[in-house]
Image (cartoon, rainbow, N blue to C red):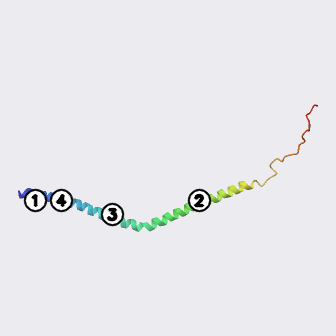
Amino acid sequence: MERPLIAVLLLVGLVIGCGVGSAYARARRSWADYQTIKKSVPGARRAAWLLIRAVTTKIGVIALLLVGAVAYAAVGADDESAQPSPTPSVTPSGRPGR
């Protein structure tokens, strides 16, 4: 009767040991990954700020071009002589033929 009890306890111990061992290995890998990511954060932060600055600069240039285009459209063309000017015309006061 002692032999099956020892076998069951050994099996339970192996199952528990495998679970604890895999959890420990996962925790060690996670800690190593955390340390690696923690060291790379300043570089990633610097890259993010550079990208934000580039996008902000592009938006500023586009906004300035739009403001310039609107101002140019509001002022009008510089060459006024190219457009036909109205000529005075005589309108008859009465109906013709009477």
Label 2 is placed on what type of residue? Ile
The image quarter in which residue 95 lies: top right
Tell me whether circle 1 and circle 3 mark residues in contact (CB < 8 Å). Answer: no
Q: Residue at x 39, y 65 (%)?
A: 37
The answer to whether residue 44 is above or below residue 97 is below
Check disc 2 and report its element: helix, strand or loop.
Answer: helix
State the residue position of label 4: 14
Q: Residue furthest left?
A: 1
How many C-alpha atoms fall within 10 Å of the one at disc 4: few (<14), some, or many (≥20)? few
Q: Mark 1 or mark 3: which comes first in sequence?
A: 1
Check disc 3 and report its element: helix, strand or loop.
Answer: helix
State the residue position of label 3: 30
Question: Residue 89: x and y, percent?
Answer: 89, 43
Side of 11 relative to 30 (left or right) = left
Q: Mark 1 or mark 2: which comes first in sequence?
A: 1
**Structural distance between the alpha carbons of marks 3 and 4:** 24 Å
Check disc 1 and report its element: helix, strand or loop.
Answer: helix
- Which mark is drawn over residue 6? 1
Question: Residue 28: x and y, percent?
Answer: 30, 65
Q: Residue at x 16, y 58 (%)?
A: 12
Label 1 is placed on what type of residue? Ile
**Structural distance between the alpha carbons of marks 3 and 2:** 40 Å
Taking depth in this image into account, of 52 and 95 the one nearest to the observer is 95
